[in-house]
Image: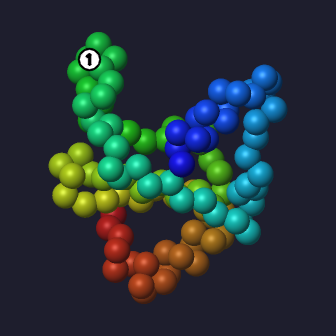
Amino acid sequence: RMRSIIDWIEQQPDKSLITTSIVYNGENFGITNVSKFQKYNLIDFGDGTPTKQRRNREFVLNGFYIVQSTEADDGIEVYFSLQTEKLKILEQDPEFKKFTFS
């Protein structure tokens, strides 16, 4: 499937017209699972390979989740962005609290 998507993108004469139809406005959400990527040993920017991969603070899409493996590959980390009021509700949920720590 990924190869066919890449092939389709390569065939488009004006790639600037390729957009997503998903609107992250609190009604929709998207999940990206990169937990199986070999991310910690692929890139060396001159100071060694990265110890952590995260989205920057400007990468704010309400309702977007990223799942990735831990550096030791002994679990997963989930990063998400939500509207503040929805996050406050989620933080009070007992089921959610079982899987989080601070």
Which residue: 18% across, 49% down?
72
Please name the residue that numbered disc 1 is placed on: 47
Which residue: 73% across, 46% down?
20
Q: Residues within 10 Å of mark 1 (few under 14, many from 20)?
A: few
Which residue: 58% across, 41% down?
4
- Above or below, 80 against 92 in this view is above
Q: In this view, does 85 lie to the left or right of 42?
A: right
Residue 57 seen in the figure: no
Q: What element carries label 1?
A: loop
Residue 98 at x, y = what percent?
34, 80
Q: In this view, does 72 lie to the left or right of 78?
A: left
Which quadrant holds residue 100?
A: bottom left
Amino acid tagged 1: Asp
- Above or below, 16 against 57 in this view is above
Q: Which colour scheme is used?
A: rainbow
Q: Pick out the residue farthest to the bottom.
A: 94
Which residue: 80% across, 24% down?
14
Which quadrant holds residue 84?
A: bottom right
Front residue (pair 64, 60) = 64
Residue 28 seen in the figure: yes
Residue 66 at x, y = what percent?
48, 54
Residue 27 at x, y = what percent?
73, 69
- Above or below, 74 against 1 in this view is below
